[in-house]
Amino acid sequence: MREEIRELEPVFEEFYKNEFNSAKITTGTNPIAKECIQLLKEKGYTVVLATNPIFPQIATYSRIGWAGLDVNDFSHITTYENSKFCKPNLNYYKEILTIIGKSPEECIMVGNDVKEDMCTTNLGMDTFLLKDCLISTEEDDISIFKQGGFEDLLELIKGLPAIG
């Protein structure tokens, strides 16, 4: 069975090189996101794109471009080729922490999904709930998280000390 799946890889690769890119029309860019990332890098922070690794690298890299960002903006990008776990499994985040050589207390998870991103508080990680494109249920108590839009995130980053 594994060999049969491997034989189909070129078909999927071709799809992600071509047809997949038509999905770009459903996305948008936010220049403040790029500004946030650049400011973090200037201040010496390690920036990781911890997107749920359900896509191959080629698709994830395309999605990064659609957002107006560059793969070189990130020290690590999760894809299904380099990840053993998915969100909200805490082992997904532990794996990233091991790769980048950081403890949870040294990091902040910025995300828009209450279940899949804010679960990092269970590791002792700081969080920021990005309410732009919020994914949440009515039962979720989001009052316990730092939160706001991209403008608020940028202000938070401006207040962080430079490191390194």
Image: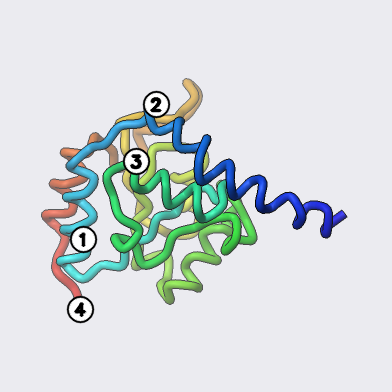
Callout 1–callout 4 Cβ contact below 8 Å: no
Whichever of callouts 4 and 2 sits on the residue coming sooner in the sequence is: 2
- The amino acid type of the residue labelled 3 equals Trp
Quarter of the image holding residue 134? top left
Category of crowding for the residue at label 4, using alpha-carbon neighbours closer than 10 angstroms: few (below 14), some (14–19), many (at least 20)? few
Residue at left 16%, top 60%?
160
Whichever of callouts 3 and 4 sits on the residue coming sooner in the sequence is: 3
Helix, strand or loop status at disc 2: helix
Residue at left 30%, top 32%?
28
Residue at left 75%, top 57%?
6
Q: Quadrant of the N terminus?
A: bottom right
Category of crowding for the residue at label 2, using alpha-carbon neighbours closer than 10 angstroms: few (below 14), some (14–19), many (at least 20)? few
Residue 150: image location, x then y, percent: 22, 39
Q: Is residue 29 visible?
A: yes
Residue 72: image location, x then y, percent: 31, 63
Whichever of callouts 2 and 3 sits on the residue coming sooner in the sequence is: 2
Whichever of callouts 1 and 4 sits on the residue coming sooner in the sequence is: 1
Callout 2–callout 3 Cβ contact below 8 Å: no
CA gap between label 3 and label 1 equals 21 Å
Helix, strand or loop status at disc 1: helix
Report the residue marked by disc 3. 66
Q: Quadrant of the C terminus?
A: bottom left
Q: Is residue 29 above or below residue 98?
A: above
CA gap between label 1 and label 2 equals 28 Å
Residue at left 47%, top 49%?
60
Closer to the observer: label 3 or label 1?
3
- The amino acid type of the residue labelled 1 equals Leu
Report the residue marked by disc 1. 40
Helix, strand or loop status at disc 3: helix
- The amino acid type of the residue labelled 2 equals Thr
